[in-house]
């Protein structure tokens, strides 16, 4: 059943409650002073003039944090250091002490009665920098003799090795056809409508903190901040209101989240911080930024015989909490895509550079892995003189081969990849391209068509989620979940599910999220995991609550629970006129509520699909226009069709943004950020996007969770960029251009044509 979203009316009327909306009497305001150098020794941080500003409460420096035992933001790693052993790199400090390592790194935190006073104070802090050499490119940073980003070690801090190097080398040496390609995956910055903000409160009597922020995984965030502050996590509560976009960029806390908590205790008042739009570019975690060497071999029938990848992944100046896993294991779970690859050798080096640290962003590593694979397949098809769709068809895993174990060790459990390919080609009228190309040519335009087959692995720190279902005296149901609504319609989806189970209108279901004190522990929402784990837990909690209601009704009626039926929020005894409303049962219980807990464990799911894109390019200007975009996605069973389509289209918008518009760029000589505002970093607008024609195929539900769902949030960001690249390079190949790195801006395309 498909329904509209419950969230929309309130948000469209301006009644949302975002992080910076709540008022706290007596609150102070914080402003971060950021480094203007990419690499420098900090000789001195003089705050004397700042303390003289009227209304300033104080200035926090690295010395203050060290004196009070405040730590850095620790990272996790799923790989070892090169040569073995644990990854050895420093935790990301809240404020730089001794040295700065990227432009934008926090150096001091000025706190005052007003934002204006805090800004004035921050501007009066005198910092004596001793600049040093810097490096911004991951491949360059990995070379011997490159400037060291951190003391005491090289810039390559971790390495993933996966597959069979010797077997892959042998297969490539014996391949009938063999080719190499160097690919750069451009650096991006997640850019939500709502800039980051945080409000910290401290209760001196109880020694507890409350943080108001926009966070996709509040329980995980609480654990990270507890480690930073050196206190048990029970002393911290995180509360999340509405979130104006997250896209992975708000999975883990940033320095400002911890700084407002520290400052709230130090100054004895609530402390607020709100990032300016420019701070999105300087202070939010960036994403992507990989340089890959890909080598592939084919046999006589053009079946893939081996795949070899050497990838340099840019961590930035520090490893963020999720930075290393995303660059390595998370992304390369599906390194061989949906194809039969008998042997592979995957090597990913995680590299420090003097740039903003990188972290999660929609797709989190899988867009990089799928892009490099789809690009090399496209180049192979052109060189070998075969239709790109046919080359993929010959190599896609067949349904009869499932479960199919891939090089990462995971097994694809369900899907019909060739059928989805053929369905997408038919939807896009693949065979009718020649006529459309001729019409473009008559207008002196270059036209190209392309496709990409994508597969994803929905993920999380844990495959388990828990939910609480509560029946209230008012006859309503309340659900408590550790997953987090951030614009993707979770409240609607959960209410729709619970309403169907209890026989209630969805408006009679209340959803509680975003409060670590009121929701069960859970990994949170990212990696398209919310419905397949969180939704499964909600379903189990609802069924568990119904069983408890039946037990209570049986006691009231002196009947067996097996004889109690439940329908439309009423319980009745078969063969009698005995019945009671759910709300009446709840009213008789202490507190007027009946609660049940349910948990669900769901291993990896593998949403997949095929996208077909057609573009027109103006050879005089290099301008790229996406004319047609078709796709078929296998997201498993669909609970709410409009929401699932919205997730697909939103992902495609961001994927297309990466392909043709977006790129964070640094000056390699100076380490200065060149794209520090929306004037320099182009975000997609409605008129940059085509009218998507996408289909959700429910023919292959998964058995890895009780709902049969696979996830829909990442697919567009994973499959969109290679589909667009395929079409652009198809249009340019008539002019002799075989490969070009994203984004395909007019300038880059114009230069390639000349």
Image (spheres, rainbow, N blue to C red):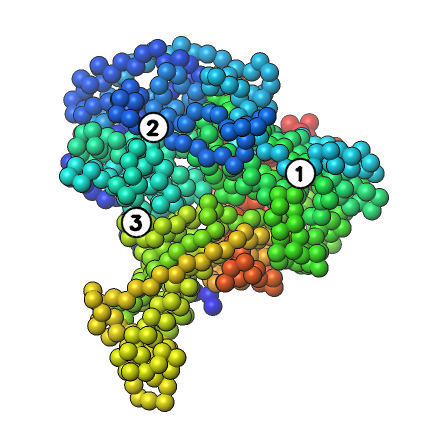
Depth check: give the residue in front, 16 or 433. 16
Q: Can residue 655 be seen in this snapshot?
A: no
| Residue at image point 59% right, 33% down | 160
Depth check: give the residue in front, 215 or 582. 582
Badge 1 element: strand
267 versus 593 height, above or below: above
Badge 3 element: loop
Comes first in the chain, label 3 or label 2: 2
Depth check: give the residue in front, 118 or 550. 550
164 versus 668 height, above or below: below
Comes first in the chain, label 1 or label 2: 2
| Residue at image point 26% right, 25% down | 68
With 372 as the anchor, is 68 left or right in this view? left
With 132 as the anchor, is 366 left or right in this view? right
Give the number of the mark in front: 3 or 2.
Answer: 2
Disc 3 residue crowd, few under 14, some 14–19, many 20+, Cα 10 Å: many
- Marks 1 and 2 close (CB-CB < 8 Å): no
Q: Residue 71 got which mark?
A: 2
Q: Which residue is mark 3?
A: 515
Disc 1 residue crowd, few under 14, some 14–19, many 20+, Cα 10 Å: some
- Marks 1 and 3 close (CB-CB < 8 Å): no
Q: Which residue is mark 1?
A: 163
């Amino acid at each position: 059943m498909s329904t509209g979203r419950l969230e929309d009316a309130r948000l469209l009327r301006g009644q949302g409650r975002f992080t910076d909306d709540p008022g706290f009497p007596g609150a102070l305001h914080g402003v971060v002073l950021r480094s203007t150098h990419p690499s420098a020794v900090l000789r001195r941080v003089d705050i004397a003039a700042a303390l003289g500003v009227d209304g300033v409460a104080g200035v926090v420096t690295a010395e203050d944090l060290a004196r009070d035992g405040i730590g850095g933001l620790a990272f996790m790693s799923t790989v070892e250091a090169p040569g073995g052993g644990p990854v050895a790199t420093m935790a990301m400090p809240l404020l730089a002490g001794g040295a700065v390592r990227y432009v934008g790194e926090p150096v001091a935190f000025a706190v005052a009665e007003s934002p204006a006073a805090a800004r004035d104070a921050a501007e009066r802090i005198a910092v004596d920098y001793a600049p040093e050499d810097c490096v911004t490119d991951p491949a360059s940073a990995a070379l011997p003799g490159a400037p060291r980003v951190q003391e005491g070690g090289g810039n390559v801090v971790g390495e993933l090795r996966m597959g069979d190097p010797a077997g892959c080398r042998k297969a490539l040496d014996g391949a009938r056809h063999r080719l190499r390609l160097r690919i750069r995956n451009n650096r991006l910055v997640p850019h939500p409508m709502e800039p980051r903000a945080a409000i910290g409160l401290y209760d001196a009597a109880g020694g507890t903190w409350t943080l108001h922020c926009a966070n996709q995984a509040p329980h995980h965030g609480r654990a990270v901040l507890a480690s930073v502050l050196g206190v048990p996590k029970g002393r911290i509560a995180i509360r999340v209101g509405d979130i104006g976009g997250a896209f992975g960029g708000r999975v883990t806390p940033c320095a400002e989240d911890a700084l407002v908590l520290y400052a709230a205790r130090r100054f004895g008042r609530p402390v607020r911080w709100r990032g300016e739009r420019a701070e999105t570019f300087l202070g939010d975690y960036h994403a992507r930024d990989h340089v890959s060497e890909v080598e592939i071999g084919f046999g006589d029938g053009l079946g893939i015989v081996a795949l070899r990848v050497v990838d340099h992944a840019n961590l930035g100046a520090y490893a963020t909490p999720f930075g290393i896993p995303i660059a390595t294991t998370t992304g390369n779970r599906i390194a061989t895509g949906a194809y039969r690859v008998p042997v592979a050798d995957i090597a990913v080096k995680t590299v420090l550079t003097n740039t903003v640290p990188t972290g999660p962003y929609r797709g989190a590593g899988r867009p990089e892995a799928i892009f490099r694979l789809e690009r090399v397949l496209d180049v192979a098809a052109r060189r070998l003189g075969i239709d790109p769709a046919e080359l993929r068809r010959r190599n896609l895993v067949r349904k009869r081969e499932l479960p199919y174990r891939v090089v990462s060790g995971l097994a694809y459990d369900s899907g019909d990849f060739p059928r989805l390919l053929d369905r997408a080609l038919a939807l896009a009228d693949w065979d009718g391209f020649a006529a459309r190309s001729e019409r473009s040519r008559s207008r002196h335009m270059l036209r190209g068509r392309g496709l990409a087959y994508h597969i994803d692995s929905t993920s999380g720190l844990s495959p388990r989620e828990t939910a609480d279902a509560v029946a209230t005296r008012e006859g309503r149901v309340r659900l408590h979940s550790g997953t987090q609504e951030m614009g993707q319609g979770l409240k609607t989806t959960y209410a729709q599910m619970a309403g169907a189970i209890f026989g209630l209108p969805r408006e009679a279901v209340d959803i509680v999220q975003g409060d670590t004190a009121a929701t069960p522990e859970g990994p949170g929402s990212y990696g398209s995991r919310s419905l397949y784990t969180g939704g499964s837990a909600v379903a189990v909690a609802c069924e568990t609550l119904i069983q408890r209601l039946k037990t209570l009704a049986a006691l009231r009626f002196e009947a067996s629970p097996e004889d109690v039926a439940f329908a439309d929020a009423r319980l009745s005894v078969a063969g009698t006129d005995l019945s009671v409303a759910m709300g009446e049962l709840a009213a008789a219980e202490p507190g007027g509520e009946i609660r049940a807990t349910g948990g669900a464990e769901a291993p990896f799911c593998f949403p997949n699909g095929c996208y077909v894109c057609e573009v027109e390019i103006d050879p005089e200007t290099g301008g790229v226009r996406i004319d047609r975009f078709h796709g078929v996605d296998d997201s498993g069973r669909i609970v709410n069709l409009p929401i699932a389509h919205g997730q697909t289209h939103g992902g495609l918008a961001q994927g297309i943004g990466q392909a043709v518009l977006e790129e964070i760029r640094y000056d390699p000589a100076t380490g200065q950020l060149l794209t520090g505002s929306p004037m320099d970093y182009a975000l997609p607008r409605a008129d940059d996007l085509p009218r998507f024609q996408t289909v959700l195929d429910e023919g292959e539900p998964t058995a890895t969770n009780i709902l049969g769902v696979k996830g829909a949030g990442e697919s567009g960001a994973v499959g969109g960029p290679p589909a667009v690249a395929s079409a652009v390079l198809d249009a340019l190949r008539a002019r002799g251009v075989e490969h070009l790195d994203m984004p395909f801006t007019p300038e880059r395309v114009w230069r390639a044509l000349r």
